[in-house]
Amino acid sequence: NKRGFIPKAVVFDSWYSSLDNLKFIKGLGWVWLTRLRSNRQVDPDRTGNRAISELIFTEEEIVVHLKGYGMIKIFQIVAKNGDMEYWATNDLSMSDLTRQTLSECGWMIEIYHRDLKQTCGVERCQSRSLFFTSNSG
């Protein structure tokens, strides 16, 4: 990209996991990690698409074809409340330890932004600097 920014990974919530977003990040050559909803369509063995929740995980992670995207790795995680979570990445060699580390970093960023909004009222601040308004094009 123009600024030379190369993240270790882009971590985001399932709310932002549209195919367009996944393809955009892939197009930049970056690794992404996100949760996918249980109804996302994948093909684990070239027998047809089905919801992630219908897959049988013989291990905690499997490589599948995400409909409309390509090959991804999915990690099946039992959440603290007992629900199943499905984390996915375009890095087919990502280990579960790396996934855990990156997801914890993502959670810390979520907490930071939540606290910034709730404690400091940043979301109500509508100020702009002169630099960004005159050079933003």
Image (cartoon, helix red, strand yellow):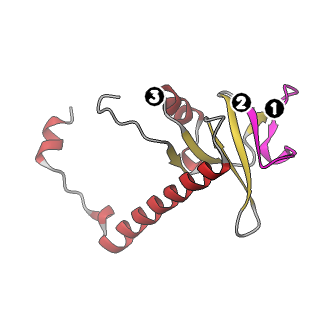
Q: Nearer the viewer, residue 130 or 84?
A: 84
* Of the two numbered discs 1 and 3 in the rendering, the one whose residue sits closer to the viewer: 3
Pointer 3: what residue?
Answer: 28
Badge 2 or badge 3: first in the primary sequence:
3
Badge 1 or badge 3: first in the primary sequence:
3
State if disc 1 and disc 2 touch (CB < 8 Å): yes
State if disc 3 and disc 2 touch (CB < 8 Å): no
**Residue beneath the point at 56% across and 55% down:** 101
Q: Which residues are magenta?
A: 44-65
Kindly identify the amino acid type of the residue bearing the numbered disc 2: Lys
Q: Nearer the viewer, residue 137 or 87?
A: 87
Pointer 1: what residue?
Answer: 49
**Residue beneath the point at 65% across and 28% down:** 69
Residue 49, percent from left and from top: 81, 32
Q: Dot 3, how many residues are within 10 Å of its Cα: few (below 14), some (14-19), or many (20+)?
A: few
User: How far apart are labels 2 and 1 at the CA level?
Assistant: 7 Å
Q: Nearer the viewer, residue 53 or 45?
A: 45
Q: Dot 2, how many residues are within 10 Å of its Cα: few (below 14), some (14-19), or many (20+)?
A: some
* Of the two numbered discs 2 and 3 in the rendering, the one whose residue sits closer to the viewer: 3
User: How far apart are labels 2 and 3 at the CA level?
Assistant: 20 Å
Q: Secondary structure at mark 3?
A: loop
Kindly identify the amino acid type of the residue bearing the numbered disc 3: Leu
Residue 34, percent from left and from top: 59, 47
- Left or right for 137, reference 28: left
Badge 2 or badge 1: first in the primary sequence:
1
**Residue beneath the point at 49% across and 30% down:** 24
Residue 75 within the segment the image draws in magenta: no
Q: Dot 1, how many residues are within 10 Å of its Cα: few (below 14), some (14-19), or many (20+)?
A: some
The mark tally for this picture is 3
Pointer 2: what residue?
Answer: 67
